[in-house]
């Protein structure tokens, strides 16, 4: 009561309670019930202060000299931020509110100025080296997929050559040369040639040991598909039991279960925070380079990601059947079998398919560190600067990933719709059975083929190289000396700022395009449908290629470093955000638009009152989500020359300084887990 | 016979759902529990088969102390007590048959049941139970392709699989169209009269109470405020149970 009386009296002069924000920023807001705003201000103020000081001391960012006094001009917006916080608290005290955007603006000035500098943004290079960019662009659209022999000399047969050949053929003119699939393309998709007979052929008695029958020899892309497929199968099988141990509603019924639950959840979160690529670095020390190592790395990360999703799904099941089955006197195992498992099958299958999609994407880059697959192929083409060959790999990846994406999305849709099947008629029963056997045999054959192709070597798994034991030992006694901590912190900040800039840049460019790619805006009229199709296709093609694969392009354009990494990240951001934004626009409900129009509002008023309120919350939520993804990606972008913590990590691994690498991994886990948590909380608040 | 003595339940968040409730149920009774939402009816029913742990007090089922039972003992008691739920609580994706069979889990050994193997006698019992509720031809369709009334009948068939001595019915008709209420309650009445199964049933509508109950208890804010025959509920009693603003309404 005293407080509200005071507020009433204080309409002319601000309440003294608000002044507490001068000393502790955010505390005043907290007192007046704006808990979230208070908390954010309370946390942001020291972070901003630290960053201003850090960037001045380490990188001379914002440095100004006033006489002999050296300081950063960034302290000015910082002071404004503090002042805004005080004004805000004083206004809240009299029941008024000032725009939060002002505070956000001051914070943004500080953050983006630092980000701009640490990411080493050199806009001039985008222009001055445009000729280099043109070279790469030409190679990208003219990939080395066909070869033409002219006078006994082989050369790449690109678009111009293909169109000419088609024209010649149609006109009945003789071709300029013999056109065939290029060796580069055959390296990717595989070729038919004599090779050493595989073991299974020998075991079946179809070939002699040591003979070289003509056979299909898989290319790097096929190897990649095998890695992704096997990793998905193995990780699903392993994640299912783990997910029950990490499900609260199951474990709370078991004595001591809560302890297991917390341990499992922590374990899954830590493993998930380490990217597949980083796992790849660790695994190659264990089993050596190759697709087998890549497959294990994919599996480990995938187990943790699926384990978390699965366990959340178990926690969200309908409790009714569980109660009913318990009431009939069933024990825990029977409850799981009869009340839980039938409920979780559709979401589990859907998540597995989603993960298959993600694993295929990761499989295309895990070869960067683990060797094997198309990732390794890309590295080998980039090193000598063979961009037409690199371009062929990118296009091949795009085709496969778009295919996987489409199949996985369609199957997920069907599964989640989960319609009751019609009762099988007796005559159809045997057909269904036959179909099952057919797919079973096909699946088994594919599995065995992938197993062979990936070179799975169970013996290697149980006989880790001696260096692996050293790695584990070094990881346990990580290097926490100040010098290391300082340099790791510095690189971590670069990484975070890289992600921030990439998210901003990608989203800004994506925003106008997302309106062009919304079915309800451009997809309906025949005059504009081509825009819809074109923009959507660009989103889909760009989205199908991992940021790590893009880095090579930007290195050629702007040089090695965080700027190139940031640009690569913003390409994938552009594609994903563009897709998500346009879907959000498509999901606008027509009801409010109709209602506002019915009041006689004009088009601008309709946009402000009926459309914006519907798209801003999903947009912000997607931005936060994207930022979270970008931080994860930024931690590895350095492996391809994109700067940031990834570069530090690969240096430490390369020079066998595992105790320092351990420090980096620990930092990544902490930052990624923290960001993951914050972004989930923020998005929860948004919805 | 069921005897409840000084039953109290306080939830971890501090809500006192039941306060010192005592009553007895003789074999073969159709006891109806009435009271507003949140008066403790569901908690009371769930304390009887220990789906909810009582805070204090005792429950005796045929002179066995239910509240003292542990682990396997609880499951042995539970299998003698069938339960029917407001939301039916069927596994929607499983077949009607599988849902009914799950009522038998307390009787069969773990490993075969995990593999979905049941004896021929158990399967016959399931078919008989479905026949009893008039759904034999629906045995092999998925539960979610049935209507609400049919789903509740599957719920009854599942309870019958336990060959129960007592059936607890928690608002069995509250999620159904009012015109279906009688069809469900008639099945319960049939079990009560023909098989001499004791029924404890919570209900909202007073005219249903008059039609089916042999005895009534009323809960208000977790306390027992009435115990007697349906005819004894006059307007004064009604207001005491449901509050001064309540009006009597009837259902077809």
Image: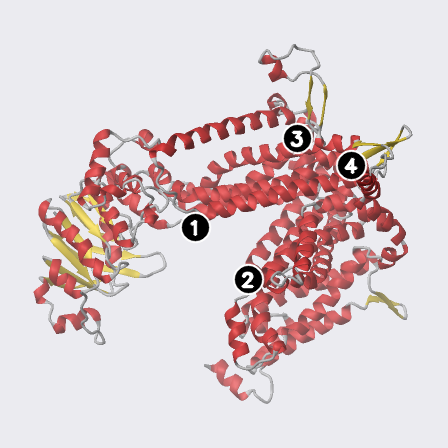
* Pointer 3 or 1: first along the chain: 3
* Structural distance between the alpha carbons of marks 3 and 4: 29 Å
Q: Earlier in the sequence, mark 3 or mark 2?
A: 3
How crowded pointer 2 is (Cα within 10 Å; few <14, some 14-19, many 20+) is rated as some
Q: Which residue is mark 1?
A: A316
Q: Is residue B51 above or below residue B106?
A: below
- The residue pinned by badge 2 equals A587
Q: How far apart are the alpha carbons under marks 1 and 2?
A: 25 Å
From this viewpoint, is residue A463 visible?
yes
A63 in relation to A650, above or below: below
Q: Real-space Cα distance between discs 3 and 1?
A: 35 Å
**Mark 1 or mark 4, earlier in chain:** 4
For discs 4 and 2, the disc positioned in front in the rendered view: 4
Same chain for mark 1 and mark 4? The answer is yes
Query: x and y percent of residue A375 in the render?
Result: 72, 37
Instruction: Identify the residue position indicated by label 4 in the image.
Output: A145
């Amino acid at each position: 009561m005293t407080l509200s009386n005071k507020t009433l009296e204080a309409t002319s002069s601000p309440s003294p309670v608000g002044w507490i924000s001068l000393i502790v920023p955010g505390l005043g807001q907290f007192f007046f019930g704006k808990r979230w705003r208070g908390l954010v201000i309370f946390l942001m103020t020291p972070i901003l202060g630290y960053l201003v000081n850090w960037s001045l001391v380490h990188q001379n960012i914002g440095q100004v000299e006033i006489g002999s006094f050296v300081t950063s001009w960034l302290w000015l917006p910082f002071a404004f931020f503090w002042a805004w916080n005080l004004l805000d608290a004083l206004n809240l005290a009299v029941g008024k509110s000032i725009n939060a955007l002002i505070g956000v603006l001051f914070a943004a000035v500080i953050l983006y100025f630092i980000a701009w500098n640490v990411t080493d943004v050199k806009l001039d290079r985008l222009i001055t080296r445009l000729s280099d960019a043109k070279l790469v662009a030409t190679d990208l659209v003219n990939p080395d997929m066909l070869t033409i022999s002219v006078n006994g000399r082989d050369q790449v047969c690109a678009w111009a050559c293909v169109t000419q050949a088609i024209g010649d053929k149609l006109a009945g003119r003789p071709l300029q040369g013999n056109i065939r699939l290029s060796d580069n393309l055959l390296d990717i998709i595989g070729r038919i040639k004599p090779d050493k007979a595989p073991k299974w052929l020998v075991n079946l008695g179809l070939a002699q040991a040591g003979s070289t029958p003509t056979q299909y020899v898989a290319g790097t892309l096929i190897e990649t598909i095998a890695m992704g497929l096997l990793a998905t199968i193995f990780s699903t099988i392993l994640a299912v039991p783990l997910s029950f141990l990490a499900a609260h509603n199951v474990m709370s019924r078991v004595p001591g279960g809560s302890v297991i639950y917390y341990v499992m959840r922590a374990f899954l979160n830590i493993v998930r925070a380490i990217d597949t690529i980083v796992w790849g670095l660790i695994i190659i020390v264990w089993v050596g380079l190759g697709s087998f190592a890549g497959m294990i790395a994919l599996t480990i990360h995938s187990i943790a990601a699926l384990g978390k999703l699965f366990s959340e799904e178990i926690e969200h099941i309908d409790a009714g059947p569980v109660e009913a089955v318990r009431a009939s006197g069933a024990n825990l195992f029977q409850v799981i079998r009869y009340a839980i498992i039938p409920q979780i099958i559709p979401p589990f299958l859907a998540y597995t398919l989603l993960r298959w999609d993600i694993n295929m994407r990761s499989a295309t880059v895990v070869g960067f560190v683990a060797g094997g697959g198309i990732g390794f192929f890309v590295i080998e083409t980039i090193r000598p600067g063979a961009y037409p060959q690199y371009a062929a790999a990118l296009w091949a990846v795009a085709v496969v990933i778009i295919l996987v994406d489409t199949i996985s999305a369609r199957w997920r849709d069907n599964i989640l719709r989960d319609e009751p099947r019609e009762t099988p008629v007796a005559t159809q029963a045997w057909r269904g059975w036959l179909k099952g056997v057919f797919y079973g045999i096909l699946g088994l054959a594919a599995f065995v083929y992938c197993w062979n192709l990936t070179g799975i070597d169970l013996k290697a798994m149980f006989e880790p190289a001696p260096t692996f034991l050293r790695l584990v030992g070094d990881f346990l006694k990580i290097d926490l000396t100040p010098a290391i901590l300082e340099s790791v912190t510095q690189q971590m900040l670069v990484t975070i700022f890289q992600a921030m800039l990439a998210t901003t840049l990608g989203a800004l460019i994506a925003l106008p395009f997302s309106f062009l790619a919304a079915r309800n805006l451009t997809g309906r009229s025949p005059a504009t449908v081509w825009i819809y199709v074109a923009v959507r296709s660009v989103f889909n093609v760009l989205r199908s290629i991992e940021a790590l694969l893009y880095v090579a392009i930007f290195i050629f354009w702007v040089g090695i470093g965080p700027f190139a990494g940031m640009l690569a990240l913003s390409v994938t951001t552009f594609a994903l955000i563009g897709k998500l934004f346009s879907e959000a626009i498509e999901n606008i409900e027509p009801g409010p638009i109709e209602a506002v129009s019915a009041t006689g509002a004009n088009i601008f008023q309709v946009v402000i009152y009926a459309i914006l309120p519907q798209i801003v919350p999903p947009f912000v939520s997607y931005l936060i989500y994207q930022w979270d993804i970008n931080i994860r990606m930024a931690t590895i972008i350095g492996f391809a020359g994109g700067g940031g913590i990834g570069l530090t990590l690969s240096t430490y691994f390369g020079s066998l300084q595992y105790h320092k690498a351990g420090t980096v991994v620990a930092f990544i886990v902490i930052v990624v887990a923290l960001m993951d948590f914050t972004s989930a909380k923020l998005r929860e608040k948004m919805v | 016979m069921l005897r409840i003595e000084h039953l109290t339940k306080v939830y971890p968040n501090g809500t006192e759902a039941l306060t010192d409730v005592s009553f007895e149920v003789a074999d073969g009774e159709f006891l109806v529990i009435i009271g507003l939402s949140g008066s403790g009816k569901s908690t009371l029913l769930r304390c009887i088969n220990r789906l909810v742990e009582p805070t204090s007090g005792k429950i005796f089922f045929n002179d066995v102390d239910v509240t003292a039972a542990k682990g396997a003992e609880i499951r042995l008691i539970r299998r003698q007590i069938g339960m029917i739920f407001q939301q039916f609580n069927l596994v929607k994706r499983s077949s009607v048959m599988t849902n009914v069979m799950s009522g038998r889990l307390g009787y069969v050994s773990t490993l075969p049941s995990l593999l979905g193997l049941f004896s021929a006698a158990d399967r016959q019992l399931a078919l008989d139970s479905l026949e009893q509720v008039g759904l034999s031809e629906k045995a092999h369709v998925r539960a979610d392709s049935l209507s609400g009334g049919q789903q509740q009948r599957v719920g009854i068939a599942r309870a019958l699989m336990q060959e129960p001595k007592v059936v607890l019915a928690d608002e069995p008709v509250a999620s159904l169209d009012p015109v279906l209420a009688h069809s469900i309650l008639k099945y319960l009445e049939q079990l009560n009269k023909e098989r001499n199964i004791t029924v404890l049933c919570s209900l909202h509508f007073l005219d249903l109470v008059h039609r089916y109950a042999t005895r009534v208890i009323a809960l208000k804010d977790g306390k027992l405020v009435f115990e007697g025959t349906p005819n004894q509920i006059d307007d004064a009693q009604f207001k005491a149970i449901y509050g001064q603003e309540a009006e009597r309404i009837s259902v077809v």
